[in-house]
Image (tube, grey):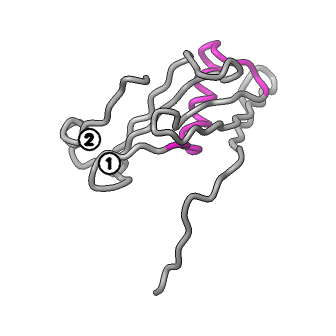
Amino acid sequence: VRRARGVVEALDRYFAGHHHAAIYLFSTETEAPEAAAHARMYSLALGANVREDPATGSASGPAGAYLLRHGLAKPGRLLLEQGYEMLRPSQIEVGLTVENGALSRVTVGGGVVLVAEGTLLV
């Protein structure tokens, strides 16, 4: 995962005009021993060139559910790490609730750091 690179031309060919051109990849080899997975997300939707997202909350919930389903995580709270390669390390908290043997609730959270702000004039 650390050596992954987003290549605009390859992503353009792969997605060929699909609405949400993004790739989320992860490994259970982590930087922090308490993390369940180390992730990266590339998306053509983030700009003209492939850009990397330092913390993808919308993908973290499904990633946590995947880890649970495949026996790589247990119900409760788990930590996903992302953004390390772009020097914006992020820790995303995922809560997995299981009731009657089935995943019944997924929550995603964590702290935030303001990196920019602006005003939109309409």
Q: Is mark 1 on a helix, strand or loop?
A: helix
Q: Position of residue 3 (x, y in %)?
A: 37, 23
Image position of 23 (left or right of 66): left
First to last magenta residue range = 54-76
The single residue placed furthest to the front in the displayed view is: 87
Q: Where is residue 55 in the image (x, y as percent from the top left)?
A: 55, 43
- Front residue of this view, candidates 43 and 98: 43
Whether 80 is drawn above or below 15: the answer is above
The single residue placed furthest to the top in the displayed view is: 71
Q: Quarter holding the N terminus? A: top left
**Mark 1 or mark 2, which has the lower sequence index?**
2
Q: Which of marks 1 and 2 is in front?
A: 1
Q: Mark 2 points at which residue?
A: 15
* Residue drawn at x 60%, y 31% as measured from the top left: 81
Q: Residues within 10 Å of mark 2 (few under 14, many from 20)?
A: some
* Residue drawn at x 67%, y 51% as measured from the top left: 112
Contact, CB < 8 Å: mark 1 with mark 2?
Answer: yes
* Residue drawn at x 72%, y 27% as measured from the top left: 78
